[in-house]
Image: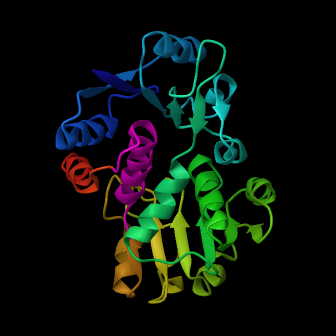
Amino acid sequence: MDVFGLLGDPVGHSLSPPMHEAAYDDLGLDARYVTFEPDDLGAAIEGARALGVAGLNVTIPFKRDALDYVEPDDLAARIGAVNTVDFSAADAGTPPTGHNTDAAGVRRAFAHHDVTLADRDAVVVGAGGAARATAFALADAGATVHVANRTVERAEELAEAVGDRTTAGGLDALEARVSAADVLVNATSVGMEEDRSPVPADALHADLAVLDAVYRPLDTRLLRDARERGATAVDGAWMLLYQGVEAFELWTGRDAPVDAMNAALRGRL
């Protein structure tokens, strides 16, 4: 039996186990997905290797710290965070490979909704971990990216890390930026705890594609406003789904059963 797992704290709320277990069941794989809340991240990763664990996901608060215990691929190193660990190429003297599939989650969520990112103007609201993965995903896909954040200095730091074709600013010019944009991503927690949007509804328009990284609730104020104005609305479960799909495919080398994973995920939301 292959064992895969999740390192985080807390992990009791995680939707990764049912999503991955659904994939194993659909493909008839002899595998299980388990969760851990380690006191020592490095010891946990090394212990997983010693036990023959096939792969790990990493979530809050360990994504940045995981860089110290893996050999990150180029994207994970640029983002500065790891959420997937692959042991397949590691031996006793070699660290496992670290990946960041959150960026693929953004890219594949938009692709699922037939949204083209190349040569588009995109706005990312936020400058935290989700915003970093999003900004790199959009820029690598060929979009021009503007990072808008309440603390301008954090937005500027992210824009500088992403590089060319990326700008930054505060929230005071957000309405004008979104009005002229093709793509919008809310990478903040606004809309999770209360029914409000981080973006003025009047800025939304029919030529816009809107992804809200919030997935609880699925139907956020931002997405309702977007649909009312004819925009393409992409809920956060698609991003969550496709980061898991990407991890599954990295670990197994097989095409993920996306429909089965999506049904399991949405059945828990």
Depth order, front residue of 61/41: 41
> In which quadrant of the rendered view does residue 159 lie?
bottom right
138 left or right of 26 in image: right
Closer to us: 214 or 267: 267
Residue shown at 38% from the left, 29% from the top: 11
Q: Is residue 195 above or below residue 232?
A: above
Q: Which residues are magenta?
A: 234-255
Residue 181 image point, x, y percent? 60, 82
Can residue 39 be seen here? The reply is no
Question: Magenta: predominant secondary structure element?
Answer: helix
Side of 98 where 239 appears, left or right? left
In the rendered view, would you say 149 is above or below 120? above
The image quadrant of residue 15 is top left
- Residue placed most toward the observer, 83 or 159: 83
Q: What residue is drawn where x is 39% and y is 38%?
A: 252
The residue at the point 20 percent across, 53 percent down is: 263
In the image, residue 94 sits, relative to residue 219, either above or below, namely above
* Residue 123 visible in the picture: yes
Left or right? Give the position of 221 relative to 209.
left
Identify the residue shown where x is 53% and y is 18%. Answer: 45
